[in-house]
Amino acid sequence: MPLKYRINSERVQIRETANEGDVEFELTFLQEEPLLSSMREVQKRFEDNDVYTDVLFYLNQDQERQYKIIVRNDFYEDFLLALLKYRILEGLEWTE
């Protein structure tokens, strides 16, 4: 079952692209704080675990408030839950 998430479009924009073995996210933060600090916490959570290829983070050099994130399919739910935990997402629900 797919997940549907809600965001505050005045604070963050999310673009999601599904690929064969992963999902690519582009997050653009329209407000610097506290969301950028929250995003660093999400990044730290995945970088500190034992799986090196679960979620890969890239900061866009041209736009310092934009992240490109590649999420393996088997970590998709974990990633969205982390975004919800750190209040980057406003809601998350299963859809039929």
Image: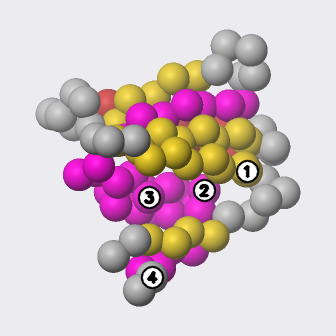
Which residue in the structure is indicated by mark 3? 80
Residue 4 is tagged as none
Q: Tag 3: Cα neighbours inside 10 Å, few (<14), some, or many (≥20)?
A: some
Which residue in the structure is indicated by mark 4? 95
Q: Is residue 12 above or below residue 29?
A: below
**Residue furthest bottom as drawn:** 96
Q: Residue 96: give x, y in percent of width and height.
A: 41, 86
Hey, what amino acid is under mark 3?
Leu
If you read the primary sequence from the N terminus, does the residue marked by circle 3 or circle 1 appear first?
1
Task: Report the span colored magenta.
Answer: 65-94
The residue depicted at 33 percent of the width and 76 percent of the height is 1
Q: Tag 4: Cα neighbours inside 10 Å, few (<14), some, or many (≥20)?
A: few
Q: Tag 1: Cα neighbours inside 10 Å, few (<14), some, or many (≥20)?
A: some
Front of the two marks 1 and 4 = 4
Q: In whole angstroms, how far apart are the C-alphas of marks 2 and 4? A: 20 Å
Which residue in the structure is indicated by mark 1? 12
85 magenta-colored = yes
The residue depicted at 75 percent of the width and 64 percent of the height is 8
Q: In whole angstroms, how far apart are the C-alphas of marks 3 and 1? A: 14 Å
If you read the primary sequence from the N terminus, does the residue marked by circle 2 or circle 4 appear first?
2
Front of the two marks 2 and 3 = 3
Q: In whole angstroms, how far apart are the C-alphas of marks 1 and 4? A: 22 Å
Q: With 29 as the anchor, is 24 left or right in this view?
A: left
9 magenta-colored = no
Residue 88 is tagged as 2
Circle 3: element type: helix
Circle 1: element type: strand
The residue depicted at 78 percent of the width and 53 percent of the height is 11
